[in-house]
Image (tube, grey):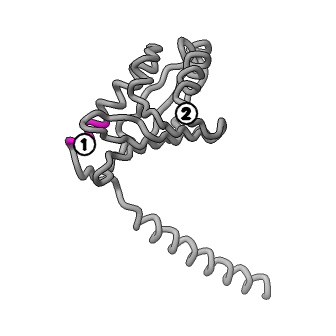
């Protein structure tokens, strides 16, 4: 009898927890683009940067990175040297890795009097192992609009 009561009580509490989780999830908003022109601009800049990335145009990448870039990588740590980031890209990425954007995942939000934040998912393909699976990973880019010229100011790259 005690076992049955314990089961009923735990089922009741599990039901309450599940209902609370559903309400919490329901409160998460779907993305609604607040500035289509800004969204299109950031997608264009993303395409421009990663076309350079995929084709090893280091000069173009360096031009788009801010001089005081902060690159946070969950496995590699923090890099604040544009030169070191470009050198690392040349050594580890050029001809070896291709990035594709999962465009439907991208969210862009304006940052008043500064620029924009871009959040989304992308995939990286190892060109030496074409059969290797590529899973979507999250990224965050902070774009700074410096007198009409867009620069990547901060990168958060998550691969875990």
User: 85 above or below 23?
Assistant: above
User: Magenta stretch containing residue 103, yes or no?
Assistant: no
Q: Nearer the viewer, residue 56 or 104?
A: 56
Distance from Cα at disc 2 to Cα at disc 1: 28 Å
Q: Quadrant of the N terminus?
A: bottom right
The disc label shown at residue 6, or none: none
User: 87 above or below 145?
Assistant: above
The disc label shown at residue 38, or none: 1
Identify the residue at horizontal 46%, vertical 64% (top origin): 25
Q: Secondary structure at mark 2?
A: loop
Q: Is residue 68 left or right of residue 78?
A: left
Residue reaching furthest to the right:
2
Identify the residue at horizontal 35%, vertical 41% (top origin): 144
Q: Nearer the viewer, residue 90 or 98?
A: 90
| Image quarter of residue 118 | top left
Q: Which residues are magenta?
A: 37-42
* Residue 134, position as x, y percentages in the image: 55, 28
Provide the residue designation for mark 2: 135
User: 95 above or below 115?
Assistant: above
- Magenta portion: prevailing SS class: helix
């Amino acid at each position: 009898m005690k076992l049955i009561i314990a089961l009923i009580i735990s089922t009741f509490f599990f039901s309450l927890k599940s209902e609370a989780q559903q309400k919490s999830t329901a409160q998460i908003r779907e993305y609604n683009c607040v500035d289509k022109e800004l969204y299109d601009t950031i997608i264009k800049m993303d395409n421009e940067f990663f076309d350079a990335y995929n084709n090893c145009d280091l000069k173009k990448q360096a031009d788009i990175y801010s001089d005081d870039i902060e690159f946070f990588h969950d496995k590699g740590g923090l890099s604040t040297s544009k030169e070191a980031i470009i050198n690392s890209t040349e050594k580890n990425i050029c001809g070896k890795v291709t990035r594709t954007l999962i465009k439907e995942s991208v969210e862009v939000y304006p940052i008043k009097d500064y620029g924009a934040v871009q959040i989304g998912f992308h995939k990286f393909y190892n060109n030496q192992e074409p059969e290797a699976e590529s899973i979507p990973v999250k990224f965050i880019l902070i774009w700074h609009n410096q007198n009409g010229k867009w620069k990547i100011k901060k990168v958060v790259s998550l691969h875990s």
